Amino acid sequence: MASTQAQILVASNRGPVSYAQDETGTLTAKRGGGGLVSGLSAIGPEAGALWVCSALGDGDREAVRRGVGEEGVRMLDIPADVHEDAYNGIANSVLWFMSHMLYQTPLEPAFGAEFRRQWASFETYNRAFAEALAEEAAQGASVLVQDYHLTLAPRMLRELRPDLRIGHFSHTPWAPPEYFRLLPDDIAAQLLGGILGADRAAFLTQRWADAFTDCCHAVLGPGIPSGTRIGVHGLGADADFLRKRSHEADVDERMVSLREQIGEGRKAIVRVDRTELSKNIVRGLLAFRQLLEDQPSWRERVVHVALAYPSRQDLAVYRDYMTEVQRLADEINSQYGTPGWTPVVLHLKDDFARSLAAYRLADVALVNPIRDGMNLVAKEVPVVSDAGCALVLSREAGAYEELGEDAIVVNPYDVSGTARALHEALSMPLDERAERTKRLAAAATALPPAQWFLDQLEALRAAA
Ligand code: G6P
């Protein structure tokens, strides 16, 4: 039983801290970043907030067993096989593919017995969260449930604790009804009904909020039956943190070595992503190759710096995508490279200091996702950029709604169009680039993480 009862609770699959265990059995904690972590820090420890999350690896599980942990964080040791089905099976193979419209019919999807078995685990996993939250929450507390992993938890929690104020926040896009209804009808209804168990369902842009409402009408009939309020909070970049962090010594060091790899006087087209199908890294490389083909004057004068960090490597489809990124980068390098020029500089090892260094020196940032809830890279680059950076941005990223005017906008499937956009971005006069970057940075920081978080809390109190 919990020793204290929390007034504000956050629930998410991935928590703010993770543990690694070395050969001697020593556990080391590693703090994560991201909007939620800085958002939650805005309310301060005295608010009595609690973050409920999953134990994700052996280190985390060992920490739970030993009772090691941070104040304000409760990790749930959900059985590994249940977590595997819920996280890899349903969340990252079905729900992620659904919201980012990544299925390649006619082969996928096929919802059969294996799916039903994994779905049962997804329910168990969501119930574990609902029960932990019900146990930890003070009377009338506010609970902010995060993302597609926890779509069922709001309804389950509502049934256990009708007194709570419950919000759900989707960090992903939401699919339009024609696509969403690929899901079996009962599953579609359960997902929507799960979120509608909340007092408030919030999204990163109006477009995703509208798609959610459209799906409710298509699947459940007209009207939002539970009276759940719908909200939009467009998470912005954390300017104070980024400006400070991007001038620390390790970032300066990475700038020197990146500059060496690019070569003096050459322009850099930079991208930074988790290596994951929705990010569209492969079409970005194809567009870069086409640029070199169509505009030979750029050969030897530009380098594509692709920082493609590993993500969800337990799943073959994500691993295969990473392999394809590597293969294509090598192919372009052997096709076009010369003794003094490597056209694609690809880094696969996660390194935040290197990402910031790349942001600082980028001439062009390429952000071309197939679909993306927001895309914070598009918002971080203009804040950190040293001399201004042209932004090539997919119209399918949530960030497009706020940054579209000063970006060069592309259809992410249009490889030739993206190649033309890269040429235009590389050719942009430096003073125009600097002007646009200023405006982009202002738009990107309109709603910093702390305010984003406080706004949600306040809206939830008003809605409940
Ligand atoms: C997206 C999701 C987050 C998730 C993150 C990293 O941004 O919206 O919920 O934490 O990807 O993915 P991972 O599977 O590594 O947690």
Image (tube, helix red, strand yellow):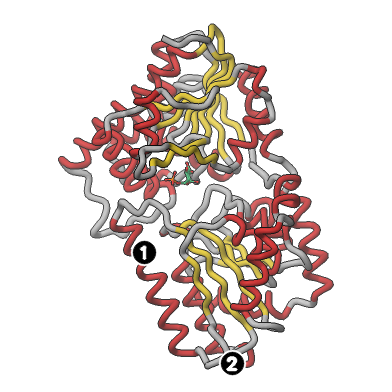
Against 408, residue 153 (above or below) is above
What is the crowding at mark 1: few (fewer than 14 residues within 10 Å), some, or many (at least 20)? some
Q: Where does the image place residue 133, in percent across and percent down from the top left?
A: 45, 18
Left or right of residue 419, residue 247 in this image = right
Residue at the location (62% across, 30% down)? Answer: 40
| Drawn side of residue 97 relative to residue 227, left or right | left
Provide residue 154's location: percent of width, then percent of height.
Answer: 44, 23
**What amino acid type is highlighted by mark number 1?**
Tyr
Q: Which residue is mark 2?
A: 296
Q: Residue furthest front?
A: 24
Q: Nearer the viewer, residue 445 or 309?
A: 309
Residue 404 at least partly seen: no
Q: Amino acid at mark 2?
A: Pro
* Marks 2 and 1, the one that precedes in the sequence: 2
Identity of the residue drawn at 58% across and 20% down: 49
Secondary structure of the residue carrying numbered label 1: helix
Q: Image check: 412 left or right of 386?
A: left
- Image quarter for residue 393? bottom right
For the residue carrying disc 2, how many other residues have a C-alpha within 10 Å: few (<14), some (14-19), or many (20+)? few
Residue 16, horizontal then vertical, whole percent: 52, 35
Of badges 2 and 1, nearer the viewer stands 1
Image disc number at residue 321: 1
